[in-house]
Structures are given as C-alpha cells and as structure tokens.
Image (cartoon, rainbow, N blue to C red):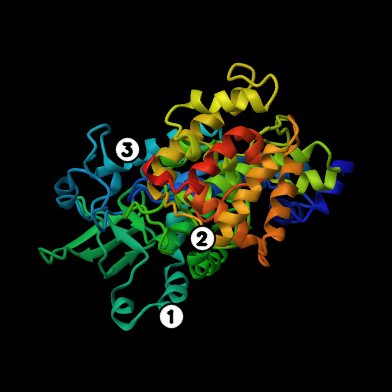
Amino acid sequence: MSSDAEIALSSNSWAFVEAKKLADRYAKEAPKKGYVLFETGYGPSGLPHLGTFGEVARTSWVRHAFSLLSDIPTRLIAFSDDMDGLRKVPDNVPNKEMLTDALDKPLTQVPDPFGTHNSFGEHNNARLQAFLDQFGFEYEFRSSTECYKSGEFDETLKLVLEKYDDVINVILPTLGPERRATYSPFLPICPRTGKVLQVPIIERDVEAATVTYNDPETGDAVTVPVTGGHCKLQWKVDWAMRWHALEVDYEMAGKDLIDSVTLSSKIVRILGKKPPEGFNYELFLDQEGKKISKSKGNGITIEEWLTYASPESLALYMYQNPKKAKRLHFDVIPKAVDEYYTFVEKFAGQEAKQQYANPVWHIHGGKPPQEAMPITFGILLNLAAVVNADDPSVLWGFITRYADGATPENNPALDKLVGYAVSYYKDFVKPAKKYRLPDEQEAAAMKDLVDGLKKLEPGTEGSEIQNMVFQVGKDNGFENLRAWFQALYETLLGQSQGPRMGSFISLYGVDEMVTLIERVLSGEDLGAA
C-alpha cells in the first residue's frame, strides 16, 4: 500500500470511512467480475431534485476515495426504476390529465406531459442525465425497462421464482393483515391494459418460469412469463434482484429506507449473493422542515441553486455532514459559498491527512483550485444591499478600489461571485430588508463611530477598523457587544445579521460609511431610499 493510501486510511473523512469498507471487502482478492460496482437509484415518478444529485455526488466521492486505497477498477451505475407503475400524478408537472389517464402504467409507457420525449420516464431520465453531466460525473446510465425487456435480469428473476416462498416469508411479517393476504413479489404487466398490476398470484410454474393471476376486471385467469419484461418485481425484492444480477458492491440510501435495506439484504442473501456495502444518509428538508419530494417539487432545484451560487458551493453542502438532516432552502446558500472558499484557501497549507479530510479534495477529485477570493459572498451581499446594486458593474466599482488589480477580466471567479450576489440580493435580500432608526444609546454610539472613522488614516486595515468599532461599543455601555453590532446592521443594512464591519467598511469606503451613518442620524428612512 502506498504512503498516500496509508495516510488516507487514517482520515476521519466520512468518504474514506466508507471506502475502507470496500477495501476490507476485497482485501484478499478482487471480485471475479474484475471491478467494484457502485450504484445509485432513481425513481423517475417525478422530476429529479437535489436529493437525487446528492446521492450520485456522495457515491462518486466514496468511489474516488476508494481509488486511492485500491487498484481494483470501479464502475458507477445510475439506475432508473422507470418500469415502475405511475401510482399518483405529481404536483409539479403540466398537462396532468395525460398522466391521470395513464395511472398504473410503467413510467416508460406514460405520455410525456412536457411533450419532449416519448414517455414521462424518458423525460425524467433525460433530466437526470443532463444535470449529472453538467457536474461532470463519470457514470453509466441504466434503465430498468431496458434491463427487464432485454433479458438481462431473466436468470435472477427465475431464481426469485424458485426461491419464492423464502423471499415472501421475509416480506410478509412486515405487512398488515390485508396486504399480507394479497402480496406477491411479482407484479404482472397486464397484456390487456399495459398496467402494472398488484394482484395475488394464484399459480407458479418454476420450470416454465410463469405466474398466473386473475384479471381484476374480467376475472379471467392469465398466465405470463416472469422474464422478458412481462413482470416487474415489488421494489424491495427488485432492489435485491438488481444487487444480485448486477453484482452491486456499494449503494447508499436515505435514512427513511433503513428497513428496506435490511429486507433487501436478507433477500439477496437468499438468492445467493452478499449485499452491498453502504450507509444511510439523513434527508434534506424544505423551509418548513418537511422531506423534499419529487412529486411535490418542494425544496430547491438544481437550476435555482445555480442561479445564485456556484456548483462547487452546492457540492460542499452535499458533502458536509451526510448523516445530519439539513434544510435545503435558499437561505443556506451564502454560508455554503463562503465556506467553500475558506476550505480552498486552507488546502495548500495543510498536511496530507488534513487535505484528505478537506471537502475540496473530494469535490475536485484530489486537485482543488488554488484561487483566493479577496471578498466574501456575505460582504458582497451586504454591499449590494447598501448601494442597491442591480448590476454587477456597481459592485465592481467598489471592488477595484478595495482589491488592487482586481477586474472582471483578471478575476473571472470573483466576477461570477459578483453576478451571483446581485441575483441573490435582488430576489432575497432586497425584498426582506426592514430598517429602523437608532435609539438614544445607539445614536450616541454611532456619533462616536463617525468621529472615529473621520480620524482614520487613509489605507487603514479592516482589522484596525473592526477594533475601533468594537471599542466604540464598549465605551458607550453596550454590555453585550452583539447588540451593538446588531444595531448597526438593523439601522444601516436593514437586517438583523451582517458582515464583519471592519472588512465591510474597507470595501464600502470610510467616507461613504460616514455619509451613510449621518443620513441615519438625521432621521432619514433608508428603507424609502
């Protein structure tokens, strides 16, 4: 083992902890298929969301970490369960009547309400692949419909039929009395209607590889093969079947699927294979603390995040604390942006073990950029708020004075950040701003602050300005200096939280800050400006 691998093995990064499971799994010999297979799953009953992206991203990071620990080749399959029946119409699609008429049909047989593809399943598959490609993931897309119909799953489907009683005895104890009486792991595709039927199986023929059921409308006994796409498995059994047929070595899942992972693991053992390694991540929540859903379309979309921040900031948010439930709403974006650049700035000076624990090592495949950002996203947002910036050029007028040699041409990463800041300011900061006038104690302190600012020498560092602002608050009797800074934020910026004032004043300008404070002290309502 290389020295890099030995260092990585001692890393507390969750991705390396997961990768070590696979290294241990194949410590004695490589898998007979010649590679380690990672899988992610997607149910295209609704449009893909950030949770879907997060699973592929996290799996990719484990895969990359494993590549440092082992020479065994790897593959990643992004699997779409597009043969599943459409059970309800999503809230966030047009032409819902098209879908209502196709309920219970396989997703690849449901018309596309967007009118861009042959089916709703194909439309959602295309959306999934588009945003995975946008982020540069290396993966192979697989369609459940194609795998079933091509015969790729046939041998394992026959095995499920052969082990029918053992499989069903794992599932039945988890079901209620009514469901237990009618449950079958095989869901026939009705030859008459094309629907995925949830009906009792009245007869099984292992040699012929067929099952028989009674048509729920006509009552006729119907016999269909379990192979060739004539039947679909219930999803917990389907999951185990897929692990067996594809020989999956690693697949993670949300915390809500812990019981399903346990059941599917039992079933794949019945079929004769070892279940994959993996872990259960916590769910993303919307603004109200509810689980984000493909069918509801709550939470943030990929497109929305990328309107206001970089792909790297999104990747960082996905990387951090995967076992902690996190809100996925617009107000998490600014912090994610600034944390990303903080990690980038730290990386070059870290030892190897620290670098392997640094999220940007994983986000950038071990080769993060070495770009320093002279201004935080938070300060840009506050500057935009003060100068009412509806155009990036307004912010650049201040930036070029603050950072020597900084121009949109010389600093393309900063230029993108400025554009994101303007967009975020216009849509979220500006509508929420609420100014107030200072009380007597605050006004007295702000007068002293003006006096202090006027005495500063040109070019005074932001840290010195910060100390001066701090001292003014102490001298004016603010026992809790947080209240002093909050007063500045609420009266000058129209918000309860804000930037480090020394850095902000350096960027905005001392003279400009004096003018702004004097406007407030004169009783001017900045909210009406």
Q: Amino acid at mark 3?
A: His
Q: Which mark is residue 30?
A: none
Q: Amino acid at mark 2?
A: Asp
Q: Residues within 10 Å of mark 2 (few under 14, many from 20)?
A: few
Q: Residues within 10 Å of mark 3 (few under 14, many from 20)?
A: many
Say whether disc 3 or disc 1 marks the residue closer to the N-terminus: 3
Q: Nearer the viewer, residue 374 or 247?
A: 374
Figure quadrant of the N terminus: top right
SS type, badge 3: helix
Residue placed under numbered mark 3 in the picture: 123
The correct choice, above or below, for 334 with respect to 211 in the image is above
Mark 3–mark 1 distance (CA, rounded to whole Å): 37 Å
Q: Nearer the viewer, residue 434 or 284?
A: 434
Quadrant of residue 121 within the rendered picture: top left
SS type, badge 2: loop
Say whether disc 1 or disc 2 marks the residue closer to the N-terminus: 1
SS type, badge 1: helix
Instruction: Name the residue furthest bottom.
Output: 177
The residue under the point 33% across, 78% down is: 180
Q: Does residue 33 appear in the picture of this structure? A: no
Q: Which mark is residue 439?
A: 2
The correct choice, above or below, for 507 with respect to 239 in the image is above
Residue placed under numbered mark 1 in the picture: 173
